[in-house]
Amino acid sequence: MLKRHATDVLAVFETHAGGDRASEICRGLGFENSFKVDAVGQSGGLWLLWRSGIGDVVIVEESEQFIHARISNGNEVLHVIAVYAAPTVSRRSGLWDQLRDLVGRISEPVLLGGDFNTIVRVDERAGGSGRLSEDSIAFGEWINDLSLIDMGFRGSGFTWKRGRSVNTFVAKRLDRVLCCAQTRLKWQEATVTHLPFLSSDHAPLYVQLTPVVSRDPKRRPFRFEAAWLKHPEFQELLKTSWRRDLSTNEALRVLQRTLVRWNKEVFGDVTKRKEGLLKEIVEVQEALETGLTDAILEREEFLMKELDVVLEQEEVLWFQKAREKWIPLGDRNTRFFHTSTIIRRRKNRIDMLRNEAGEWTTDEKEMESLAIAYFKRLYSMEDVEEVVDKLPSDGFEQLTAGEKQHLEKDFVASEVESAIRGMGKFKAPGPDGYQPVFYQSSWEMVGSSVTRFVLDFFRTGVLPPMTNDVLLVLLAKVSTPERIT
């Protein structure tokens, strides 16, 4: 298994070995370095093994139930806490408080993983009691108190199982990997895979901080960024780029090409702009200490104003992506919005599915084929027993002449604007990538075109091709989907 899954750090639990025997096994696994908490008799045992190439590893703290290591390589630092919680509640008493104190003292990225010997939710168990124990509730509260993030998983939903018959079978997700927001932001693509059960009643967990992710940037759809509205040049760009002589759909497509180019050449990467401004502000403030001049003071004031604009753009950018409705925009909650976005993306991403043979596949093309085949069957006429050509009218009251006249009354421009402004600013866009916030903020420029487009539709009953197209997005209704159903 180690040959198949390249591993730089390995944590082994319930080793039931110590002394020379433990050292011999560690060398046989091919790791140059190791730290061992030996088993007491036939109970416990916790090892941490690592390869020399990962950088400097310092064992900070250890106990019978965890090993805390600090790994540093250049400017990158990661605290790894390998946890083996004792199998009985009495023996692991105090562990959560001990880890709470430990994690609370760390200001750098943290990763906690291992066998916690308890679950968080009822759906993390098959068989056995249908209620959460007090220990499970305490574990969930501990995760929340420390603001830890469950890194999720792909593969089987359980990491421990027992019993060989329906009456005795029990399976649980006792093992997991948790991290702080700092870790999740730094390694956004990190994955946890539940490998198959082999010689143990626990499934191995395989953590990849930087997995190979193959995505075609050309397939990424256009999305209007609300942060562009905060740029001082945006309104002038819109004024010179919006083509009133074209249909609304054509004008939007022309504007899209202009915005993509402008974003690359002018707007740029918000994070890099922020870092550049912060660096220059530090240099200017250091210069003030050696020689005070009006020019330097004016430069500092200019940079601070620029930074304020960039910080606002950054907050809007991540607010738009996070889709959080209960925290207001404008309170500098950028970090929260950024973290929420990463968590939502990881939760929504489908990394693997079972094919028709019941085998797991991670191949993107094969998963696409499975999805397309499912929806073709879903929207086909297969298994349709009756086709209804028109709705029955029995039981419905007839409209009066006055009601019919009211319904057939022509719409007016003010109603179109009212409808647009009544939409949620950040409602999910269609294939064209424009959200209501664009129309609401740019109504003075685009309003006449949009109004003409809408009123023409109600007058003629005809929509231009692709106007009503939608994006079909697969959203998992369970934590780790296996099949499309």
Image: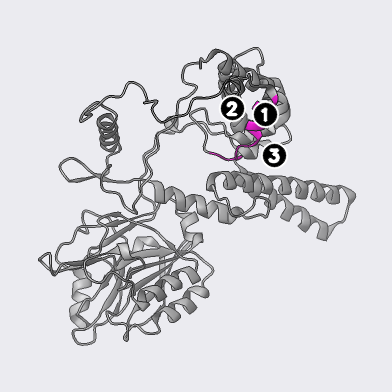
Q: Between label 1 and label 3, give the one nearer the viewer.
A: 1
Give, as a single range, the part of the protein colored magenta: 414-427
Decide: few, some or many residues near mark 3? Use Cα within 10 Å; few <14, some 14-19, many ≥20.
Answer: some
Q: CA distance from mark 3 to mark 2?
A: 17 Å
Q: Label 1 vs label 2: CA separation? A: 29 Å
- Can residue 272 be seen in the rendering of this structure? no
Taking depth in this image into account, of 273 and 49 the one nearest to the observer is: 273
Lateral position of residue 422 relative to residue 428, left or right: right
Could you tell which of marks 3 and 2 lies nearer the N-terminus?
3
**Is residue 386 at least partly visible in the picture?**
yes
Q: Which residue is mark 1?
A: 417
* Dot placed on the residue nearer the N-terminal end, 1 or 3: 3
Q: Is residue 330 magenta?
A: no
CA neighbours of label 2 inside 10 A, class few (<14), some (14 to 19), many (20+): few
- Residue 230 is labelled as 3
Under mark 3, the amino acid is: Lys
Q: Is residue 181 above or below residue 114?
A: above
Horizontally, residue 433 falls left or right of residue 96, namely right
